[in-house]
Image (cartoon, grey):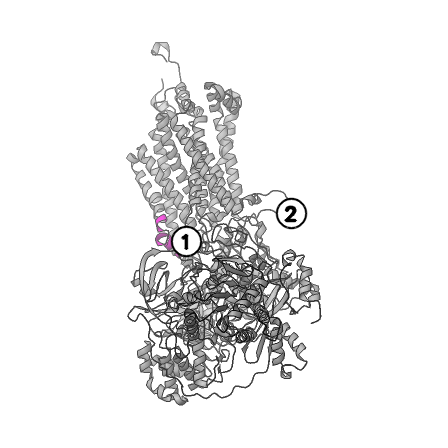
Amino acid sequence: MSDGIKRRDFLKVLGAGSAGASLVGCSTDDVERLLPYVVPPEEITPGVATWYTSVCRECDAGCGIWVKTREGRAIKVEGNPNHPISRGALCARGHSSLLGLYNPDRFAGPMVREGGELRPISWEEAEAMLAERLQGAGSNVLMLTGSAPGSLGELFDDFVSAVGGTRVEHELLSEAPLREATRIAFGRNVVPAYDMERARMVLSFGADFMETWLSPVEYTRGFGRSGSVDDHGSNKAAMVFLGPRLSLTGQNADEWFPIRPGSEAAVALAMAHVIAREGGDAGPYQPVLEAYTPAVAAELSGVGADEIEDLALRFADQAPAVALGPGLSGHHGNATAANLAVLILNHVAGYVGRTVRVRNADLGAASQSYAEVREATRRMSADGVQVALVHGTNPAYGLPRDAGFVEAFGRVPFKVSFAECMDETAALADLILPDAHALESWGDSNPRPGVYALQQPVMERVPHFDSKQAGDVLLSVAARLGRDLGAATFYDFLRGRWERAYDTSMGSDGFEAFWSTGLKNGVVTIAEVEDQREILRAPDVALTFDLPEFTGGDLEFTLQVHPSSRLGDGTQANRPWLQELPDPVSKITWHSWLEMNRHTGESMGLRNGDVVRVESPHDAVEVPVWLYPGIREDVVALAMGGGHTDYGRFGTGKGVNAMALLPSLVEQPSGALVLQATRVQVTPTGRHRRLATIEGADTQENRPITPAVALAALGHAEADDHAEAEGEHHDELQELQAYGGFVPVATEGRAEDFPLPGSQYGDYDPDENPRWAMAIDLDKCTGCSACAVACQAENNVAWVGEDQVTMGRDHNWIRLERYYETVDATHAGPVDVRHLPMLCQHCGNAPCEPVCPVYASYHTPDGLNGQIYNRCVGTRYCANNCPYKVRVFNWYTYTGEEPAFDGMGYAPEPLNWQYNPDVTVRTNGVMEKCSFCVQRIRETENRARIEDRPVQDGEVVPACQQSCPAEAIVFGNVRDPNSRVARVVENERTYRVLDELINTQPAVHYLKKVTFHEVEAGEH
Amino acid sequence: MATATEQPRGAMTHPDVKSYGQVNQEILKALSRPGKGWWALLALSVAGIGLFFTSWAIQIVKGIGVSGLSSPVGWGVYITTFVFWVGIAHSGTLISAILFLFRAPWRQSVYRMAEAMTVFAVMTAGLFPLIHVGRVWHAYWLIPYPNSRYLWPNFRSPLVWDVFAVTTYFTVSAVFFYLGTIPDMAAARDAATGWRKKFYKMTSLGWRGTDREWHHFSKAYIYLAALATPLVLSVHSVVSWDFAMGIVPGWHATIFAPYFVAGAIFSGVAMVITLAVPLRKIFGWQDYLTVKHFDALSKLILLTSMIVLYAYLTEFFMAWYSAEEPERGVFWNRLFGHYWWATWIMLVCNGLVPVLLWFRRVRHSISALFVISIFINIGMWFERFVIIVTSLSHEYEPFAWGVYRPSMVEMGILIGSFAWFGFWFLLFTRLLPAVAIAELKEVLPLPYRPRPQEGGAD
């Protein structure tokens, strides 16, 4: 397979049909042999997708991906099923990497600043210029990089030592305190790995493991498996969230301890105290634990001592459990101590080595220290830096203002940026050497011991942009300087490194076979070493476990700055998909908001959307307020990622930069930047804006939209009675409907219910076999919204812009609804927030179908609600008549080269390269909605027909199911009694939204969320 | 000599109209050279039409998004205004056809302008479905026409029924209207000079007033009246099914057809008053449009207002009685939700204001009636707004609730629609006899030449 046509040659031939003309002149020297996953290159057919494995670079979790390419263009990113981290799933940010690849604001080529203006130059000139400046700089070279795991980081280090200088890594979302705490506790400078899947109980001290913490996709899947009931309706692990604000992870918890900011350490130690008292081993920390009784912790945290004691006992009882965190919301002045306290808790309970694995993981983000950045800043201000190279980080945006980075950086005589597109730091640079996008680059990663993944380019570099991978640039510049770094291209460097690391334990067929397998599968896994017993060590630094200091001491609110689950630290702020993805917690798009407790806000006379001035001792921002029951009354929260001043057309001027409010504080001993650092004052400005939100009402208003069932009631007679009562109710309804002349149908969508009674009135053919159906387990679904972005990528769903969303014209085919049931920030207790992915229900008795005057909305013989875009005249009656409100209308052409109005959705070249050629691109005036990925159904059916066999169960996988990290979605033919979906539908938790009320017979079945607390029988 | 009891009924309603000649003269004088006021109004309406088509052109070029419509409120001012104009169109045919068949004594004076109003209102209403659709250039797909792909409209869709109901209604009412004007065109022809004479020559189809012609005319008229009568009930019933056939809470109700028909008559008669009062004033037709006519119209308003109010109350009661949360939610939201003001405007204008008509003094005060009719016009526009918008904004799925704010373009088209209607009505007042001359004469006392011995002369 490895000796076929070179992919690049193939692309050149193929280019005639796709991008032929524009590919000419694009530098391709470094693209070597790329191996598609399933199909050897010689078998590629235009119209048939080719898949390449790679590694996702949107955060440092190191998820393996495979990328669908059609005719040489990457069109969809999916999780690599072979990769042990992602196992086929992917988060919203991962999907959006395509928009980074095709970002129309990427630099067209290298540029140099002359007289304040940037002028394009050739790579030849640019590299010569850099070599010349480096020649004269001596050892005064500073290389500032983001996290650069694997070979790239090694190359950076080699380069810096070859030219003489220092390298500083800077990443805002750093887990340095966790790493430092692990070093203190267990003597190993690593970030532990957590095994959610085995955990019988999960305790999160503010660790947002479903959104941004360490490895969200892996941990969401793990908790999806452990934290939901199994087929027998049992074995559900509880999750308890301890923190001042309910993040999305917190909303998925079963209990919430709304502890005071900074009191994580005290609570964790008090729990350890209780467990140690019952016989746990606290090693050298026994004296520390003596001091932290539940009473002390209760005093510091604001929750009851009894509750802490009870939680500790349950935590010890539910072995193995796991305590996580505190994560970035615990990045306060005593963050290392807090992390250490949680590790002690895990150790005392005996979970280290079982669910907490202290092993070396190459998670880049964890290694940097802000202290080094401060030192570099000091050197720059003291004119101690001649040449500064910046790669993969944007400190001019992401650091607190009084860090003084911008001023210091400005003093450097020659500043080089490797940014792909303009950002705040590149805007200050003298030379811009645009890096290739991650999907166009080579790389590798080692996110876990024994897991080695290769990042390979999945397509030719986008010809609109004359980019070059930073590794190649550095190697070429080093060669100009006469330094030999052992390779001419980064590909050679990487391969050489792998070749050196290879030994026969990794595979007995020699390196060439090993390398091919690595490229093909995207990942090589080597047998794991057994965990050793970890011994808790005495601290070698002074630590305090008490409440940290906050600047602005007497101000009313503690400010929580947290990474956005959509925009991360702001790096993804130029992705329209993510900007328009409703935040999983607030459901707000595009702009920033200040989260404030609902009661506090109401007592201040504030409504959602009232603009407030948030003032810390360091700066002030004005931002609309969003009132939230899930945050303590003395805390306000602001997400990172907004307020870019120079980040392309999609990223600039959206929201406010939370970092502006922070002081430049270093946490000791980890050296991390303190994010939870200050208190703020909040004053109304008297102005108001309509929030760009998709949220209507936040409660179910007594409708059976997302009913739940208590764990205790599962599988019991009581529940059966209830079901029977429901059945009787259904009969009554049937009778009534018969009188009314409606089609009387009582079906639960099971195989034996087909053909549907009454189907003779529609266009449903009772003899056709497939009835495509979906089941969504709400006990697993976390509301992370990865499905919504996956759907957008698969189905060419347009983004529409902030104004349109504000008007209520959000366009996503999947709406993650979020309803509050029990949320109380005043004391510890159960929390119940329901998430429901609402998509077209493909009703058997669809209200949208009869009202369409032109049959644009119609019923296919296999039970889908078809929507024929080019037949639609746009009366919008179908949308009015859809009780689920899942139809979205193209009020303008959101997919054109130009926006209909400023700020509105459009797809400028080359953003439109991302479009899936199997799906129509919609224009002005037509209705659209979820199609159950009909293009995938038809593709599978066609393949089965060619191979003369029936479609197998599980063969058709819609984009949402494919992406779901929690494995909450099942899709298949419900008329096949052996299919997985048909079996899931038999589950006692299964219900269909509103079906009882309006007899729509949806094809989407939901499985009720399971709660630990009692849910009233009638409660919805 | 005729005694009072033997007099034709018209003599009671038009006591001051003395002779056929007087009728010809006084009605046809409206067709003379118009004054500055008329030209000013015409200029205003042409400007409004400019606004109308400019707004529409912006919408076609940019997209339907220039309206304030959104999800979940996919129908708004356009459909509201469509139903409003269809409702207005109602009373014309009611007065001309149904009251003709019932031989109501007072219809002759008002039916011509009511019929004209009907035709122009349907012409206005008919534009709105076109304005409303996302791709107007494909709107003809709603019409069943033979095509090579055998693609037909969906006859289960109420929108297709709408196409038939409105086009049928327009055709029949236009023919009925034209037929009724033929003898008057002839009268105008006989009086006119210049280009007008040529115009009336053509439009009167050579009417000479022979017995034979009158015979055919009256047969045709009665048949058309019989044909138009069911349409009066059907057109607005069908329009109401646009809503009632949907499952939207607040729409899905069996009372919708009678409710809408009553509402349509209510609003249409109010509009007749709104139009008749200025005409009466300007052309000095106090003798023709007497207080008795207005009194009769007021009673019709009073009746229909009570039906409409009863329908409102039934809706609220049924929402409560159904015990269905979405249904209850919609009606609670109507009264106290985001659009509470629209609902209260509707209730006050349509339910409360017409109560004044119980008083004879109010019914006999032309200016009071004019003011009340304006209130009813406003109230009935809001009734449709309330039905459409409050229901859609507050449906089954609470998370998807939303609000709708009309945009400038929608307002431009709403205002422009009145200009479009006004333009045709202004032309009508100067080109056609706004009061039916021939029919009026039927109810006048027979002219007789007094015998010389009884004294007096013409």
Q: Which residue type does callout 1 highlight?
A: Val
A994 part of magenta stretch: no
Please name the residue that numbered disc 1 is placed on. Answer: B403
Q: Does A188 appear above or below A552?
A: below
Q: Which of A770/A123 is in front? A: A123
Mark 1: few, some, or many residues within 10 Å (few <14, many ≥20)? many
Residue situated furthest front in the rendering? A136
Q: Does B370 appear above or below A938?
A: above
Q: Which residue type does callout 2 highlight?
A: Arg
- Tell me where the magenta segment starts and ends, as one range: B327-342
Q: Which of A428/B121 is in front? A: A428
Mark 2: few, some, or many residues within 10 Å (few <14, many ≥20)? few
Residue situated furthest top in the rendering? B453
Q: Quadrant of the N terminus of chain B?
A: top left
Q: Which of A261/B277 is in front? A: A261
Residue A886: x and y, percent?
50, 58
Please name the residue that numbered disc 2 is placed on. Answer: B149
